Image (cartoon, rainbow, N blue to C red):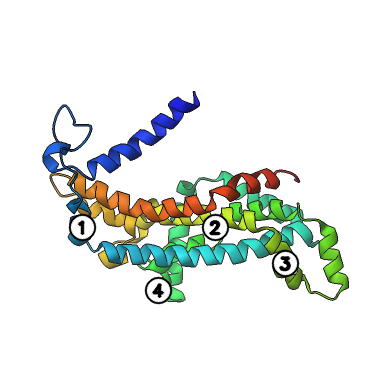
Amino acid sequence: MLIQMTFILIVPLLWMLVTSLETEGETNRFPPVLLPERPRFENYTEAWAAAPFGHFFINSLLVTSVVLVSNLIVCSLAGYAFARLRFLGRGALFVTLMATLMVPFQVTMIPVFLIVKWFGDNVAEGLGIDHLGALMLPNLATAFGIFFLRQFFQTVPVELEEAARVDGTSRLGVLFKIVLPLSLPAMSTLAALTVLTSWNDFLWPLIVITSQDQMTIPLGLSYFQGAHRVKWPLLMAANVMSLLPMLLVFVGAQRYFVQSVASTGIKG
């Protein structure tokens, strides 16, 4: 069963790779060809030149970097507060935060759009609609990230923190010098998930971005779809290029996934 499921998941990726090396004639041929007669690597250079792909790449890299750094900082601070600090309303606040995980994005889409528009009108234009800030603002921290790190922080022996506190280390010092270094698997996993989510986000950019110079890669791929036909080899080549950075991220972080997920479920 596992082999069949793996096959189902891999076939679309292989088909995308094969199509990226075909000519348009081979792509539209019926019955379809399994392998191109002569791999056409020129599709990649043509795809890069046909659209401002480099600009789309830089936009995606900028948005993903800001969202990543913000999530790691905010989620680690909030997660540690929920895991270790005692304050009034902590339980109710945490339950409310977890409840947001059950609300689909489609429900909050319009309120978030209005909030982003307000920020653009009243705080800074760069945070408003049709700016990269509109892609960053709603994703600076996530309820899942806070929950994920909170669960992992609870597995860190509290005795280590108490010993550091006896030596005069502040709460922030304990977090940054003891807890976070011990939480590298969880931080790496959250970083990988954040990068994958931000890099591949399509729906929200589709709603708030209209200018080509503000487009990220998922939106920019629509550049290869004409009014009457789609240039499938170029589109698939662009897809492969957009996939490569995420493949590197996943390969680099995969060894932390199982370790962090297993540790996260130890304490509730």
Residue 33 coordinates in the image, percent (x, y): 19, 31
Please tell me whether mark 4 sits on a helix, a strand or a loop: helix
- Mark 4 vs 2, N-terminal side: 4
The amino acid marked with disc number 4 is Gly
Between 88 and 216, the one nearer to me in the picture: 216
Please tell me whether mark 1 sits on a helix, a strand or a loop: helix
- Mark 3 vs 2, N-terminal side: 3
- Mark 1 vs 2, N-terminal side: 1
- Distance from Cα at disc 3 to Cα at disc 2: 18 Å
Return the residue at label 4.
126
Are the residues flagged by discs 3 and 4 in contact, CB closer than 8 Å? no
Q: Is residue 61 above or below residue 145?
A: below
Q: Give the number of the mark in front: 4 or 2.
A: 2
Are the residues flagged by discs 4 and 1 in contact, CB closer than 8 Å? no
Quadrant of the snapshot with the C terminus:
top right
Residue 199 coordinates in the image, percent (x, y): 41, 56
Between 71 and 173, the one nearer to me in the picture: 173
Q: Give the number of the mark in front: 3 or 4.
A: 3
- Mark 1 vs 3, N-terminal side: 1
The amino acid marked with disc number 3 is Leu
Q: Is residue 5 visible?
A: yes
Q: Give the number of the mark in front: 4 or 1.
A: 1
- Distance from Cα at disc 4 to Cα at disc 2: 25 Å
The amino acid marked with disc number 2 is Ala
* Residue 143, disc: none
Return the residue at label 2.
191
- Distance from Cα at disc 1 to Cα at disc 2: 31 Å
Question: In the image as oriented, which residue stretches furthest toward the top?
Answer: 1
- Distance from Cα at disc 3 to Cα at disc 4: 33 Å
Please tell me whether mark 3 sits on a helix, a strand or a loop: helix
